[in-house]
Amino acid sequence: MPYIRRRKMTAPLSLYNIPAAYPFLDSFAHGLLAEYANDPAAFQSLKILLPTRRTCRNLRNAFLRINDGAPFILPNLIPVGDLDEDELKLHAIAAGHSADIMAIKPAISPLRRRLLLAQLIQRIPDQNTRPEQAVALADSLARLIDTVHNEDLSFEALNNLVAAEFAEHWQITLDFLEIIRIHWPKILQAEGCIDPADRRNRLIKLLISIWEKEPPQSPIIAAGITGSLPSTAALLHKIAALPQGQVILPGLDSYMDSESWAALDATHPQHVFHQLLSRMGGVSYKDIPDWPALHAAPKRSAAIERRFDVLSETMRPAESCYKWAALRMRGDDARKAALEDSLEDIHLIQAKTEQEEAEKISLILRETLEHPQKTAIVVTPDRALARRIGAAMRRWDIQLDDSAGTPMHYTRIGSWLQSSAVFLVENLRPLPFLNFLHHQLASCGCEDHYIADIASLFDRHIMRGAAPSGGYDGLRARIQKRLKEEKINEDIAEKCADFLDHLQDLTAPLYDLVQSGKHDFIAWLNAHIETAENLAAQPEKTGAERLWCGEDGEEIAVFLSELKRQAYNLPDMDGESYLAILVQLMRGMSVRPLYGTHPRLQVLGQLEARMIHADVMILAGLNEGTWPADPGHDPWMSRPMRSDFGLPSLEQAIGQAAHDFVQCFTGQSVYLTRAERKDGAPTVTSRWLLRLNAVLQALGRNIEELSFAEVDAWHAALMRQDGDAQPVSRPEPRPPASARPTSLAVTSIGRWMRDPYSLYASHILRLQKLNPVEEDASALDQGNFIHKVLEEFTKAHRDTLPGDAADQILALAEEIKKDWPEVQNIPNFWWPRCARALTWFVDHEQGWRKSGHRPKVIESEGKIDWDGFALRATADRIDNTALGDKIIIDYKTGTPPSKQDMVAGWEPQLPLEALIVQNGGWQGAEGRVCDLQIWRVTGGTPAGEIHTHEKIFVAALSAAEDGLSKLIKAFESAETPYYSLPNPAAAPDKNRQDYAHLARVAEWELGIAAPKAVRGEQNG
């Protein structure tokens, strides 16, 4: 016969406990099925209240699993937060409360509430809150409102807080909460709704009131509910008092000593029961028996039951921790041995990083699958770690069932909604534009291969370097500029321009709004959806057909439809604000897979894992700040304010997390994992692991003894590559003589000497470094700009300088700047330096001209044939002296080469230019070179300076000539390799080693000597 029998209303409360050593749902399901085995009709009439919808699903699965999958009619399983309103209406009518239930307004949509609260936050004077910040704050404010309702409080109690007692910024917050107190009820009234938590409280109170008059005729069981909220506690109290009601608590420690029970604080796992029993009139925890039907539950091993003795010791309140010392001194050796044996299947895994932690957990999960029917659950509040574990399992093509799902903005469709709008909202800025083109859903009505080709063209040829001016016209101008500079050909220019015309038509709905200012949210949303569908269309399938299907597509379609219904009456906004709000709203949503996950493996958060059991339980992320999470601070009230207002302590969440931690120890094997570093920073071990270690030390053991060495070996094997790792050797390519360059610029000769491999890569393989997308202005851009200004100014005034030369060169700089996007990105602080540099140049040029010097060659190319090798150069400037000799001038804005390097032959540029001049290679500049000069034009202190090389000219020229001849002769042979960095002491600066990654320099450079042959030749 079923154990639930009618009791008189005056009988004691019907309160029971399923100890933590028993897997709650499995034990509960076994017990019910055993008790009602002979009365299926009574079983079906049961009403069972459970904590969450997921718990209802899991209990349903437990029933089916115990019944070997055979179908049968189940009891009515009801999540306590979603009371059956239709049935409640019937009860209300029967008890004469029909008017009362009709008076309870519907709950406001969570989405609508977020939007309305965000509006309210933006109206705070002098705050200038961005829309996305307002939505984030709205989420926090909604939690505060729910907490106030959950605790059965009212914002009217704000009057009890004396603002003068708090700091000024809290007074500002109190002023805003006063706005909430006054205006939020009016907003709700206008909406015809109430807050969800308020509505739940009213329904629960009404249900209790109905049961007072008309107790339910069928049995009601509240199972696994901790009653942390006053309204839920009142409901449990009422159910426990019903003639056919029962409340079954999950994991009450009824064997705790009285001293510890009296000292419980908010961080203790039993605090929630302490609070519940106090609300039930002070029921003693020792008077609550185990659930009678536990006899039908599968027997637990003695070791697992004793495991919870250790956990009870671990969780002792601080006031009774002194009893740990007595563990070692107790004479009951048998009990001590039993406690030690209870830890046999508890393992500790400490990883160096979170990635290693995820990989080791994945190995445990994979090993679990080697045992048929064996199940495993990973419990962690760390969503990033959960995603890492999921990614690691895909190594074996295993999809995990992650209860949290994938955040909506991370899904394929979610990312497409962002990509298809960001590049338009940001006026076709290069990075978001390329991100859009490379998205897997970008088709634009074209074939996939065409879009891939277009994406490659824009990536390689159009978007590199500084960002172009905005919009479609800016991109068209960039295409023409690259064509004019001969960086692209006519075919590429035409393809890119045609695609832009097509793209502009497709994006017109959203882009036209972006260009026309502010609009209401619904207009933005409609235009965004239309544009996203246009851009996702394929020749044989519409964009709508591609987007709104599949798990993420269907879920997001529902979300967008709801958003259309709820986002009315929002103020006008610009595109950036619209997109920020949309993304922030998506952040609060998740998409869960409906199928395709492994049936024996799960990844759960703390809430979802409550009362769930598996053979292998993995408690992951056991670091302070993760599990337990840092309670942080309430942005709306300080701790004293919360206390005065009547809100619970923030630390109460730690107590709930501790209860979840304890409840997870029901598995046959339990793994406790943590990472020593997270995001590169050291972590702090979870307080529960530290407490467990303290208990173990009292028993004469150490937590390190629980380390699971096997997983370290598995991980090492997983990470090990086939065969022994072999050090890579320095590359030494030997292309045939026919492929070797026979013509070089003088600027390449020094690179040839210092790093032959870079010459091989650039001139033989023809690999050129791509500039970054949206490249910031660099020192190179500054130097190129000054070079250009000096070149144009000198060409315009070859013979004489004007009287207002300084004004003219500055005006010329402004003109050149207008058509140079890269230069326009140079920070403003540099331009005064530039002006000083140009002014110094004019001052020096005036004195230079007076001494009889005149520019003869300006940015002109010269070349000669040297031992069958074509040597060419473009000189910044070659001037005539008053005697007709030549001075080669090079402008520098950076550090000039040293005279020692020039004499040694490592910096041969200027000496080789002199070689070309003296061998008649420069038309109009034939003659004797008497000096090599570097004009350093920086605008600093000093603004400029002259470096002459008259004294070392002969030695430098001889070294350059000799080095060039040796290089040409050596590399004529196909046997001479193009070594990478043959002389480390003479290697170029790291930031100038453009091909170091191709040469794998970092893998071989340490301790490698220079190749003697090449080193000797090039040092010679």
Image (spheres, grey):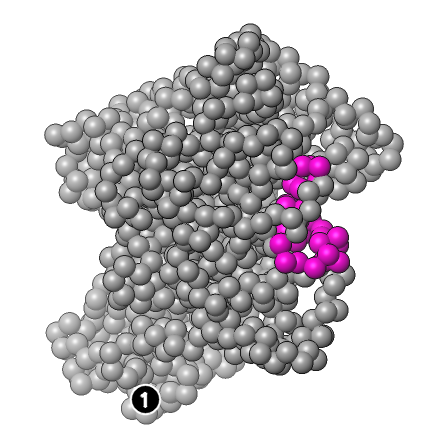
- Left or right: 821 as drawn, with respect to 998: right
Q: Is residue 147 visible?
A: no
259 part of magenta stretch: yes
> Is residue 115 placed above or below 405 in the rendered structure?
above
**Mark 1: which secondary structure?**
loop
The image quadrant where one finds the C terminus is bottom left
> Is residue 663 placed above or below 229 in the rendered structure?
below
Q: How many marks?
A: 1
970 part of magenta stretch: no
For the point 42% across and 22% down, the residue is 563
Magenta region:
254-281
Depth check: give the residue in front, 404 or 236: 236
For the point 51% across and 75% down, the residue is 341
- Left or right: 925 as drawn, with respect to 790: left
Residue 911 picture location, percent across and down: 40, 74
Residue 439 picture location, percent across and down: 29, 42
The outermost residue toward the top is 99
Crowding near the residue tagged with mark 1, few <14, some 14–19, many ≥20 C-alpha atoms within 10 Å: some
Residue 269 picture location, percent across and down: 62, 52
- Left or right: 490 as drawn, with respect to 209: left
Residue 592 picture location, percent across and down: 35, 40
Depth check: give the residue in front, 520 or 350: 350
For the point 81% across and 30% down, the residue is 161
For the point 14% across and 77% down, the residue is 737
Depth check: give the residue in front, 977 or 196: 196
Q: Is residue 560 visible?
A: yes
> Is residue 569 placed above or below 311 in the rendered structure?
above
Residue 212 sits in quarter: top right
Depth check: give the residue in front, 666 or 376: 666
Please state which amino acid type lies under the numbered disc 1: Pro
Residue 149 sits in quarter: top right
Would you name the residue on which mark 1 appears?
A: 1011
